[in-house]
């Protein structure tokens, strides 16, 4: 309920205050990365995604970018020690962009106790966030060939 409320509140705040934010709430089967998923499309269009996943229990992170099979995220948990898992990287040189890089495979994992796993589909949820001024759309990206 809190994620749904936050999504709706931010969207309505944007409309009422002419603040360029738009949000969309997703749950269950719609929350995955890869192919033509809404999460992947959001990251490609310069948006960000808040997801609930596992980090020793329910935890929320901000996905900021996808490059190939790697996803950049900002995790609010401070961590100094590197991860022992090879598919999770700790980044300390880009505090305004990301502080972790995790593979799509790890994020899409369905097990409830996997580190940074989105977990079982029935418990997944996400909020897509867009800055309306910088959002890439078809109108802004269509190329004409002569």
Image (cartoon, helix red, strand yellow):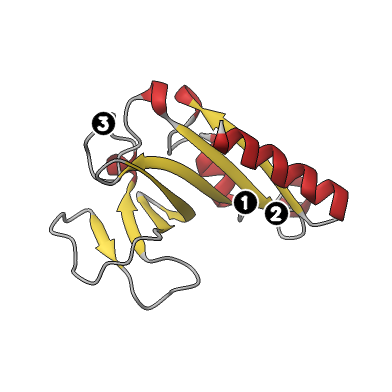
- Name the residue tied to disc 2: 135
Name the residue nearer the viewer: 86 or 128: 128
State the CA–CA distance, disc 1 to disc 3. Answer: 29 Å
Name the foreground residue: 134 vs 51: 51
- Distance CA(mark 2)–CA(mark 1): 6 Å
Q: Within 10 angstroms of label 2, few (less than 14), some, or many (20 or more) residues? A: some
In primary-sequence order, the first of circles 2 and 1 is 1
- Residue drawn at x 50%, y 72% is 96
109 left or right of 13 in image: left
Q: Residue furthest left?
A: 84
Which residue is labeled 1 in the image?
45
Q: Earlier in the sequence, mark 2 or mark 3?
A: 3
- Label 3 crowd bin: few (<14), some (14–19), many (20+), radius 10 Å: some
| Viewer-side label of 1, 3 | 3
Q: Quadrant of residue 18?
A: bottom right
Residue farthest along the front direction in this orientation: 2
User: For mark 3, what is the residue?
Assistant: 112
Question: Crowding near pointer 1: few (<14 within 10 Å), some, many (20+)?
Answer: some
The N terminus, quarter of image: top right
Q: Are marks 2 and 1 in contact (CB under 8 Å)?
A: yes
Mark 1 residue element: loop
Looking at the image, residue 144 lies above or below residue 128? below
Of marks 1 and 3, which one's residue comes earlier in the chain?
Answer: 1
Pair 2/3: label in front: 3
Q: Residue at x 43, y 65 (%)?
A: 98
Is residue 146 visible to the viewer in this orientation of the structure? no
């Amino acid at each position: 309920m809190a994620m749904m409320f936050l999504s709706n509140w931010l969207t309505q705040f944007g409309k009422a205050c002419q603040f360029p934010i738009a949000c969309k709430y997703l749950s269950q089967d719609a929350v995955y990365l890869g192919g033509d998923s809404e999460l992947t499309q959001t990251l490609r269009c310069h948006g960000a995604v808040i997801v609930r996943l596992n980090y020793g229990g329910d935890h929320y992170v901000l996905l900021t970018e996808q490059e190939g099979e790697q996803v950049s995220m900002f995790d609010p948990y401070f961590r100094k020690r590197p991860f022992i898992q090879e598919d999770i990287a700790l980044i300390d040189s880009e505090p305004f962009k990301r502080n972790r890089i995790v593979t799509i495979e790890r994020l899409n994992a369905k097990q409830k106790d996997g580190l940074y796993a989105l977990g079982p589909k029935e418990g997944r949820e996400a909020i897509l966030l867009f800055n309306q001024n910088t959002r890439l759309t078809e109108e802004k990206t269509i190329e004409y060939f002569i």
